[in-house]
């Protein structure tokens, strides 16, 4: 055993006494070959390698920079090749007829580029084959005379894979790579062999093992209840960062990721009664759509990242990348750019990163009003897998075990049986199918509890009484969900109202001429102050529900006789 550079290396001797040209990568390892002193140029070249993995995504090889590069990756279990020689990328996707390439079997990849001249214009014919059978051929559109590179060959990963030009993935490879070779019509680079032999132009990163070891797949976890969550270490993202993961659910709303920064210190920076302003980062599901929320101190950015609902029960892949104020979020390979307001380019997060929900005790958390699922206690219910932060894997199953996370299980299955078929909701509650669970909507029943089995407390008022609830701290919200039941023979009366010493903001629900009237006042501007819905007969219990989400407002009423 010996040590070299930034990492460690071990080798096994083959039967014939020859070192194997194979290495194991576990997500944090890679090696690179420096081409800066000896740039390569040729009219024909070839890249060959073999890989074995259980992981769906990962960078296998990259060389080049800016608009001149070659990238070979595994994405969603298929082999992706991206080549750009100056004026546009050529992409090729190779998929097996059955299954995926992340089946823990060895697969051989061969990429060739040949310069072809026609009428004095040079084009490159690119061919990629996997296992000698699956072949894709195409042509780049540039006019050039030579193929070349003067940067690095990155094998198995890079310091920041998300920042590599043209990279379709943001995480490093996990598995085994064997016989990585580059050759052209002048010379041959056996990159795997050079890494084992500690060539001066090779740099090793991480604890590389130069033999093939099993690398376990990142097991999925299931968040079984809205109260389930996992704490991740603080994300030290500052100016750049990337996050990728897969999720799967049939439920419409839930908080996926959340972290916030340190609150301002001192009276000059924060006025009493005002909303605490901090940097934050969040991803949430709302009504089946994925949203990205980020604030780096210069104002919020809220982006609807999916153009269609993603709570269809299938796996959905999310890839977030940021550099300074700009970045992109990709949902199932559909990328959408974003740009934060001018000002700060630093995302300063100080809290843990929460996955799937928030702790029950939120006194130490600063919840921005823009993150509706956090304010409404909508925890995520469903599966998550393949979480990578800044290209490094996070074993969420192991984290859940260490934290003894309640309601988090180490598998992901979708039950075909309808949970509502057993009629679990009592007293007229409406049953809704969730992710491997039923959800009882007890609105309008007079009962509470998971199965609408607990009779609600009834308060009586004679017209001169009221109940006052004092909130210990000033609340700043963009989303409210209020429901109540009432029975009265009078046509007028206040049902509920919110007030504040700091502003004229209010949400008011009242009876007005036998109708429900909802008034919302924000910043002294009355918004839709006469929304009216007729109630029932007046002889039984009535149900009033109001849901307010920023510019969207909904109200409903109904009645039941008891």
Image: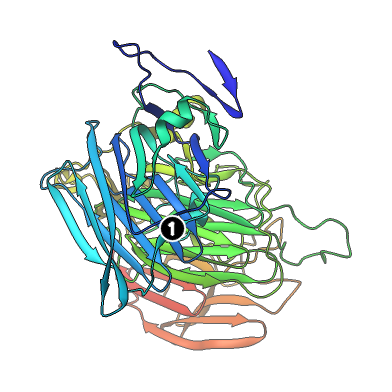
Question: In percent of the image, x 29 and y 10: which residue is there?
Answer: 15
* 13 with respect to 303 (left or right): left
Vertical side of 396 occupied by 142: above or below: below
* 52 with respect to 129 (left or right): right
Pick the front one: 150 or 73: 150
The location of residue 291, given as percent across then percent down, is 45, 64
Q: Circle 1 sits on which residue?
A: 148
Q: Is residue 497 visible?
A: no
Pick the front one: 222 or 448: 222
The colour scheme used to paint the residues is rainbow
Vertical side of 146 occupied by 118: above or below: below
Pick the front one: 425 or 491: 425
Vertical side of 428 occupied by 538: above or below: below
The location of residue 166, given as percent across then percent down, is 42, 61
Q: Quadrant of the C terminus?
A: bottom left
Pick the front one: 504 or 195: 195
The location of residue 409, given as percent across then percent down, is 36, 32
Q: Is residue 328 visible?
A: yes
Question: In percent of the image, x 62 and y 68: which residue is there?
Answer: 325
Vertical side of 176 occupied by 146: above or below: below
The location of residue 506, given as percent across then percent down, is 62, 76
Question: In percent of the image, x 65 and y 71: which residue is there?
Answer: 299
């Amino acid at each position: 055993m010996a040590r070299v550079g930034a990492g460690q290396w071990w080798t096994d001797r083959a039967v014939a006494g020859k070192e194997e040209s194979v290495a194991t990568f576990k997500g944090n390892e890679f090696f690179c070959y420096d081409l800066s002193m000896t740039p390569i140029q040729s009219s024909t070249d070839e890249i060959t390698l073999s890989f074995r993995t259980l992981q769906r995504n990962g960078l296998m090889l990259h060389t080049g920079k800016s608009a001149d590069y070659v990238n070979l990756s595994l994405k969603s279990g298929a082999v992706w090749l991206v080549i750009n020689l100056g004026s546009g990328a050529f992409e090729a996707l190779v998929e097996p007829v059955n299954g995926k390439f992340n089946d823990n079997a060895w697969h051989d990849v061969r990429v060739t580029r040949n310069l072809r001249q026609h009428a004095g214009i040079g084009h490159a014919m690119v061919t990629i084959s996997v296992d000698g059978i699956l072949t894709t051929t195409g042509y780049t559109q540039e006019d050039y005379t030579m193929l070349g590179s003067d940067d690095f060959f990155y094998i198995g990963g890079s310091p920041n894979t998300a920042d590599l030009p043209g990279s379709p993935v943001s995480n490093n490879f996990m598995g085994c790579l064997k016989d990585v070779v580059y050759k052209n019509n002048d010379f041959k680079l056996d990159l795997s062999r050079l890494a084992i032999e500690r060539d001066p132009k090779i740099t090793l990163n991480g604890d590389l093992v130069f033999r093939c070891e099993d690398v376990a797949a990142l097991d999925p976890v299931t968040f079984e209840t809205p109260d389930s969550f996992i704490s991740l270490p603080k994300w030290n993202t500052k100016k750049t960062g990337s996050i990728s993961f897969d999720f799967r659910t049939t439920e419409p709303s839930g908080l996926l990721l959340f972290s916030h920064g340190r609150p301002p210190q001192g009276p000059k920076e924060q006025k009493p009664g005002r909303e605490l302003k901090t940097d934050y980062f969040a991803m949430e599901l709302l009504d089946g759509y994925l949203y990205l929320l980020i604030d780096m101190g210069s104002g919020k950015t809220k982006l609807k990242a999916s153009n269609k609902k993603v709570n269809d029960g299938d796996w959905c892949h999310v890839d977030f990348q940021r550099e300074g104020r700009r970045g992109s979020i990709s949902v199932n390979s559909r990328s959408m750019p974003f740009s934060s307001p001018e000002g700060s380019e630093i995302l300063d997060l100080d809290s843990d990163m929460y996955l799937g929900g928030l702790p029950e005790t939120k006194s130490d958390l600063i919840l921005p009003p823009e993150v509706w699922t956090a304010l409404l206690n909508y925890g995520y219910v469903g599966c998550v897998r393949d979480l990578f932060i800044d290209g490094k894997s996070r074993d969420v199953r192991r984290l859940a075990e260490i934290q003894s996370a309640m309601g988090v299980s180490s598998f992901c299955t979708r039950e075909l049986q309808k949970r509502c078929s057993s009629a679990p909701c009592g007293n007229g509650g409406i049953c809704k199918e969730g992710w491997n669970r039923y959800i009882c909507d007890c609105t309008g029943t007079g009962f509470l509890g998971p199965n609408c089995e607990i009779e609600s407390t009834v308060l009586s008022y004679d017209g001169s009484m009221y109940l006052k609830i004092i909130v210990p701290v000033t609340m700043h919200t963009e989303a409210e969900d209020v429901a109540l039941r009432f029975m009265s023979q009078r046509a007028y009366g206040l049902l509920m109202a919110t007030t504040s010493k700091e502003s004229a903001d209010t949400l008011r629900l009242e009876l007005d001429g036998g109708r429900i009237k909802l008034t919302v006042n924000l910043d002294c501007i009355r918004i839709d102050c006469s929304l009216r819905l007729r109630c029932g007969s007046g002889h039984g219990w009535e149900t009033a529900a109001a849901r307010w989400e920023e510019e969207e407002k909904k109200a409903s009423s109904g009645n039941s006789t008891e």
